[in-house]
Image (tube, grey):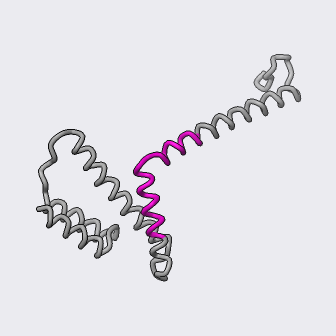
Amino acid sequence: MIGDLNGDGKVDKADWEIARRRTKEAAGDLAEEAARLGKAVMRAEMTRDVATGAAIGAAVAIPVPIVGPAAGAVVGAGVGLYKNLTKSGERHASATGPAPVHDPIGDLARLDDLRQRGILTEDEFQTQKRKLLRQS
């Protein structure tokens, strides 16, 4: 029989208790795995950068009625992601040997694209542009 979990030839309260116990054990295992995965995600540097950017963006945008904290958090998360991606590119380059050839025109184009998509503000774009021009 399909529901006869204890093999006594009938589906009864004992089978129900076995099913309940197994379900509880499976749910506990699932919760432990979800907690482990959540901790691993929170240890990731990209997660911290995105969360930090989102928190700062939300806090900065609170007094701006049109934007609001939700939109500020989205923009801040984008900036945090951009920061992490550019930072990990620098770490990777230093770990693998000589620095890559600097492409200021390509870097400016990427920054301008981020500005046009609203990920960087005009001030952030100008700041990054000055940094790039100083490096050249």
Q: How many marks?
A: 0
Residue that lies at the very extreme toward the top in this rendered image: 8
The image quadrant that residue 26 belongs to is top right
Left or right: 44 with respect to 132? right
Residue that lies at the very extreme toward the right in this rendered image: 13
Q: Position of residue 25 (x, y in %)?
A: 71, 32
Q: Position of residue 67 (x, y in %)?
A: 45, 77
Tell me which residue sits at (19%, 70%) in the image: 130
The image quadrant that residue 80 belongs to is bottom left
Q: Is residue 49 magenta?
A: yes
Q: Is residue 124 above or below residue 65?
A: above
Quadrant housing the N terminus:
top right
Tell me which residue sits at (26%, 44%) in the image: 92
Q: Is residue 123 above or below residue 89?
A: below
Left or right: 134 with respect to 38? left
Magenta region's main secondary structure? helix
Q: Nearer the viewer, residue 13 or 53?
A: 53
Quadrant housing the C terminus:
bottom left
Tell me which residue sits at (44%, 54%) in the image: 48
Q: Position of residue 3 (x, y in %)?
A: 79, 26
Tell me which residue sits at (83%, 30%) in the image: 17
Q: Is residue 1 above or below residue 78?
A: above
Q: Is residue 127 magenta?
A: no
Q: Nearer the viewer, residue 108 or 44?
A: 44
Q: Nearer the viewer, residue 131 or 79?
A: 131
Q: Which residues are magenta?
A: 34-58
Q: Is residue 84 above or below residue 131?
A: above
Q: Position of residue 34 (x, y in %)?
A: 58, 41
